[in-house]
Amino acid sequence: MKFYIATDHAGYAVKEFTKEVVKSLGHEIIDLGPDSADRVDYPDFAKKCANAVIEDRGSFGILICGTGIGISISANKVAGIRAGLCHDAYTASMCRAHNDANILAFGERVVGKGVIESMIEAFCNTEFEGGRHAGRVDKIEDGCVFGSDLG
Ligand code: RB5
Protein backbone atom coordinates (compact mmCIF):
# COMPACT_ATOMS: atom_id res chain seq x y z
CA MET A 1 0.00 0.00 0.00
CA LYS A 2 1.08 3.56 -0.59
CA PHE A 3 0.39 6.15 2.14
CA TYR A 4 0.63 9.91 2.42
CA ILE A 5 0.98 11.30 5.95
CA ALA A 6 0.44 14.78 7.37
CA THR A 7 -0.10 16.18 10.86
CA ASP A 8 -0.44 19.47 12.67
CA HIS A 9 1.90 20.53 15.51
CA ALA A 10 -0.11 18.44 17.99
CA GLY A 11 0.43 15.30 15.91
CA TYR A 12 4.02 16.00 14.92
CA ALA A 13 5.72 14.10 17.77
CA VAL A 14 4.40 10.71 16.63
CA LYS A 15 4.82 11.28 12.88
CA GLU A 16 8.26 9.60 12.61
CA PHE A 17 7.13 6.67 14.75
CA THR A 18 4.02 6.24 12.58
CA LYS A 19 6.12 6.29 9.40
CA GLU A 20 8.40 3.59 10.80
CA VAL A 21 5.42 1.38 11.63
CA VAL A 22 4.06 1.70 8.08
CA LYS A 23 7.49 0.94 6.57
CA SER A 24 8.06 -2.02 8.89
CA LEU A 25 4.86 -3.56 7.51
CA GLY A 26 6.30 -3.29 3.99
CA HIS A 27 4.31 -0.27 2.82
CA GLU A 28 5.41 3.02 1.28
CA ILE A 29 4.83 6.35 3.03
CA ILE A 30 5.32 9.89 1.75
CA ASP A 31 5.62 12.71 4.29
CA LEU A 32 3.67 15.88 3.43
CA GLY A 33 4.75 17.75 6.54
CA PRO A 34 5.01 19.74 8.61
CA ASP A 35 8.79 19.65 9.06
CA SER A 36 8.85 21.01 12.62
CA ALA A 37 6.66 21.21 15.69
CA ASP A 38 5.87 24.89 15.04
CA ARG A 39 2.18 25.78 15.31
CA VAL A 40 0.24 25.20 12.08
CA ASP A 41 -3.43 24.96 11.11
CA TYR A 42 -4.70 21.40 10.73
CA PRO A 43 -7.02 22.18 7.76
CA ASP A 44 -3.98 23.09 5.63
CA PHE A 45 -2.32 19.72 6.22
CA ALA A 46 -5.56 17.78 5.96
CA LYS A 47 -6.04 19.36 2.53
CA LYS A 48 -2.50 18.46 1.37
CA CYS A 49 -2.96 14.81 2.32
CA ALA A 50 -6.55 14.54 1.05
CA ASN A 51 -5.63 16.04 -2.33
CA ALA A 52 -2.65 13.67 -2.66
CA VAL A 53 -4.86 10.65 -1.95
CA ILE A 54 -7.41 11.76 -4.55
CA GLU A 55 -4.80 12.53 -7.19
CA ASP A 56 -2.87 9.28 -6.63
CA ARG A 57 -5.62 6.75 -7.27
CA GLY A 58 -5.53 3.75 -4.93
CA SER A 59 -3.34 5.43 -2.33
CA PHE A 60 -4.20 5.99 1.33
CA GLY A 61 -3.57 8.66 3.95
CA ILE A 62 -2.74 9.00 7.62
CA LEU A 63 -3.68 12.23 9.41
CA ILE A 64 -2.79 13.10 13.00
CA CYS A 65 -3.70 16.11 15.13
CA GLY A 66 -4.23 16.45 18.89
CA THR A 67 -7.58 14.66 18.93
CA GLY A 68 -7.86 13.55 15.30
CA ILE A 69 -11.14 15.44 15.15
CA GLY A 70 -10.24 18.67 13.36
CA ILE A 71 -7.97 17.02 10.83
CA SER A 72 -10.53 14.30 9.95
CA ILE A 73 -13.42 16.77 9.69
CA SER A 74 -11.27 18.88 7.35
CA ALA A 75 -10.21 15.94 5.16
CA ASN A 76 -13.79 14.76 4.82
CA LYS A 77 -14.66 18.03 3.07
CA VAL A 78 -12.68 16.83 0.04
CA ALA A 79 -14.84 14.90 -2.43
CA GLY A 80 -13.90 11.23 -2.52
CA ILE A 81 -12.20 11.25 0.88
CA ARG A 82 -13.50 8.98 3.60
CA ALA A 83 -11.36 9.69 6.65
CA GLY A 84 -12.09 7.44 9.62
CA LEU A 85 -11.31 8.87 13.04
CA CYS A 86 -10.05 5.81 14.91
CA HIS A 87 -9.24 5.02 18.51
CA ASP A 88 -8.25 1.35 18.44
CA ALA A 89 -7.69 -1.65 16.16
CA TYR A 90 -11.44 -2.32 16.00
CA THR A 91 -12.37 1.11 14.63
CA ALA A 92 -9.37 1.04 12.27
CA SER A 93 -10.45 -2.31 10.89
CA MET A 94 -14.13 -1.38 10.63
CA CYS A 95 -13.49 1.89 8.82
CA ARG A 96 -11.91 -0.18 6.04
CA ALA A 97 -14.39 -3.08 6.14
CA HIS A 98 -17.62 -1.08 6.22
CA ASN A 99 -16.76 2.47 5.14
CA ASP A 100 -13.97 1.88 2.61
CA ALA A 101 -11.98 4.58 4.42
CA ASN A 102 -9.04 5.90 2.45
CA ILE A 103 -7.59 7.91 5.33
CA LEU A 104 -6.83 6.74 8.86
CA ALA A 105 -7.05 9.64 11.32
CA PHE A 106 -6.19 9.64 15.00
CA GLY A 107 -5.21 11.90 17.88
CA GLU A 108 -1.71 11.98 19.31
CA ARG A 109 -3.18 13.13 22.64
CA VAL A 110 -5.63 10.22 22.65
CA VAL A 111 -3.73 7.07 21.71
CA GLY A 112 -0.32 5.65 22.65
CA LYS A 113 2.31 4.05 20.45
CA GLY A 114 1.03 0.51 20.99
CA VAL A 115 -2.44 1.51 19.85
CA ILE A 116 -1.02 3.38 16.85
CA GLU A 117 0.81 0.23 15.80
CA SER A 118 -2.30 -1.93 16.18
CA MET A 119 -4.47 0.56 14.27
CA ILE A 120 -2.08 0.68 11.33
CA GLU A 121 -1.85 -3.11 11.21
CA ALA A 122 -5.64 -3.41 11.34
CA PHE A 123 -6.16 -0.73 8.67
CA CYS A 124 -3.62 -2.35 6.33
CA ASN A 125 -4.89 -5.89 6.83
CA THR A 126 -8.58 -5.21 6.27
CA GLU A 127 -10.30 -5.09 2.88
CA PHE A 128 -13.55 -3.26 2.13
CA GLU A 129 -16.32 -5.87 2.37
CA GLY A 130 -18.47 -4.34 -0.37
CA GLY A 131 -21.95 -5.93 -0.57
CA ARG A 132 -24.52 -4.03 1.45
CA HIS A 133 -21.82 -1.56 2.50
CA ALA A 134 -21.08 -0.56 -1.09
CA GLY A 135 -24.50 1.04 -1.59
CA ARG A 136 -24.07 3.10 1.56
CA VAL A 137 -20.64 4.32 0.53
CA ASP A 138 -22.10 5.15 -2.91
CA LYS A 139 -24.74 7.27 -1.17
CA ILE A 140 -22.03 9.24 0.60
CA GLU A 141 -20.24 9.77 -2.70
CA ASP A 142 -23.48 10.70 -4.51
CA GLY A 143 -23.98 13.47 -1.99
CA CYS A 144 -27.31 12.23 -0.66
CA VAL A 145 -26.32 13.27 2.83
CA PHE A 146 -25.65 16.87 1.86
CA GLY A 147 -27.89 19.57 3.32
CA SER A 148 -29.68 20.36 0.07
CA ASP A 149 -31.27 16.89 0.16
CA LEU A 150 -32.67 17.13 3.63
CA GLY A 151 -35.76 19.13 2.76
C1 RB5 B 1 -4.33 21.92 18.44
O1 RB5 B 1 -4.17 22.48 19.70
C2 RB5 B 1 -5.59 21.07 18.41
O2 RB5 B 1 -6.70 21.88 18.52
C3 RB5 B 1 -5.65 20.24 17.15
O3 RB5 B 1 -4.52 19.46 17.04
C4 RB5 B 1 -6.82 19.25 17.06
O4 RB5 B 1 -6.91 18.48 18.22
C5 RB5 B 1 -8.09 19.81 16.62
O5 RB5 B 1 -9.07 19.10 16.39
Image (cartoon, rainbow, N blue to C red):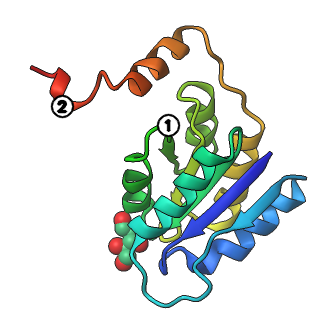
Q: Of the residues under marks 2 and 1, which one precedes in the sequence?
A: 1
- On screen, 29 above or below 150? below
The residue carrying mark 1 has its beta carbon less than 8 Å from ligand 1? no
| Residue in the image at 37% along x and 61% along y | 70
The residue indicated by pointer 1 is: 80
Measured from the top left, where is residue 102 in percent x and y?
60, 41
| Residue that label 2 marks | 147
Whole-percent x and y of residue 29?
77, 60
Going by the image, does 53 lie left or right of 120?
A: left
Give whichever of 45, 14 is nearer the camera: 45
Q: Visible in this render: residue 54?
A: yes
- Element under disc 1: loop
**Residue 51, percent across and down?**
54, 53
For the residues labelled 2 and 1, the Cα–Cα distance comes to: 17 Å
**Residue neighbourhood size for the residue with mark 2, other residues' Cα within 10 Å, grouped as few (<14), some (14–19), many (≥20):** few
The disc at residue 6 is none
Which quarter of the figure has residue 117?
A: bottom right
Cβ–Cβ under 8 Å for marks 2 and 1: no
* One can see residue 105 in this view: no
Disc 2 residue type (three-letter): Gly
Residue type at mark 1? Answer: Gly
For the N terminus, the image quarter is top right
Give the image quadrant in which the ligand numbered 1 is located.
Answer: bottom left
